[in-house]
Amino acid sequence: MPDVASLRDALGTEHPPAAAGFRIVSLVPSLTELVCDLGLAAHLVGRTGFCIHPRAAVATIPKMGGTKDPDFGKIRAARPTHLLVNVDENRREQIAELARTVPHVIVTHPNRPEENLDLFHLFGGLFHREREAERLAADFRAAREELRQAVAALPRERVLYLIWKNPWMTVSRATYISAMLAAAGWDTEPAASVDRYPRLPETGEEPGPLDHLLLATEPYRFTSADFPLAEARFAAPARLVDGELLSWYGSRAAAGLRYLARLRTA
C-alpha cells in the first residue's frame, strides 16, 4: 500500500487510498482516459461530454455537462466519492461548490511532461492500480528517451502554436503544451506572457522571427484551409498538428512524445 502522505494532488492535499466501492466522476477528458486505461472504467459513474476516449469504454458512462458547465444535479445524484478536476480546464468556484458534497476532490495541474509520472503515481496509489500505473510510467520514460535521442542533433526552432482564431490565441511557456514542444526542441513564442493562453493582435508585428506555425486541431479545429490566413498574419510556414496528442496529459502522453519525434524528424 502506498504511503498516504505521498498521495498529494496539485494543491498539496493528501488523499488516502480509496475505500472499497469508490465512485469516480471525471470532469477532465484526459483524466477520464487515464482512469479507463488503469482498468477503472467500472468505477467511473460520470464524465463530461468532451470525455470521448476511449470510445468503447465511455459510451455507456453518463454525461454530466461540460468542463466549464458541469451539471451539479447529475453529479450529486451519481454520489461520487472522488471528483477529478484540473486547474486549467475547470472553474475554481464550481470545484469549490462540488467539494461541499463530494468527499474527495482530486485537483490536477501538470505543466511539464515529467509531471505525468506524478499523476500515474497519484492515481495508481489512490485507486489501487500501482502495477498498471508503473506500466504507464515505464512506457512514458521510454518514449521520453526516444524523443531525446531523435532530436539531440537537431537545432532548436521557434514556433507559434495556435489554439484559436477570431481572436488568434496561443500558449505561454508556462503551459503543458509548450513544455511538450520544448522537449522536441521547439520553443514557443512569445517568450514572455502574463496570461497562460494569450490573445494575439490581429495586426502588427508577429512574435517572431518564427520557423513554424503549428495549428492545432483542438480546441479550435484548424484545418489546412486556415493556412493562408495564418501565414499571411504571422509570416511563417504553417503545419497542422494533433492537439489531443500535444495537450492530453495522462496515458496519452507517451504517444504524444512519439508523435513529436515523428513531427520533428519528418
Image (spheres, rainbow, N blue to C red):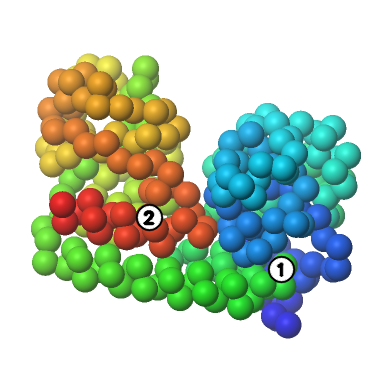
Task: Tell whether 27 sits left or right of 255.
Answer: right
Q: Residue at x 66, y 42 (%)?
A: 59
As drawn, 147 above or below 160: below
Q: Which residue is drawn at 30% across and 72% down?
A: 145
Q: Mark 2 points at which residue?
A: 256
| Label 2 secondary element | helix
* Outermost residue toward the front in this view: 56
* The N terminus lies in quadrant: bottom right
Residue 187 locus on image (x, y percent): 24, 50
Task: Tell whether 13 sits left or right of 265.
Answer: right
Q: Name the residue under label 1.
A: 126
As drawn, 263 above or below 235: below
Which amino acid type is shown beneath numbered disc 1? Leu
Residue 91 locus on image (x, y percent): 64, 36
Q: Residue 49 occupies which quadrant of the picture?
A: top right
Which of labels 2 and 1 is toward the front? 2
Give the total of numbered labels.
2
Task: Tell whether 146 sits left or right of 156.
Answer: right
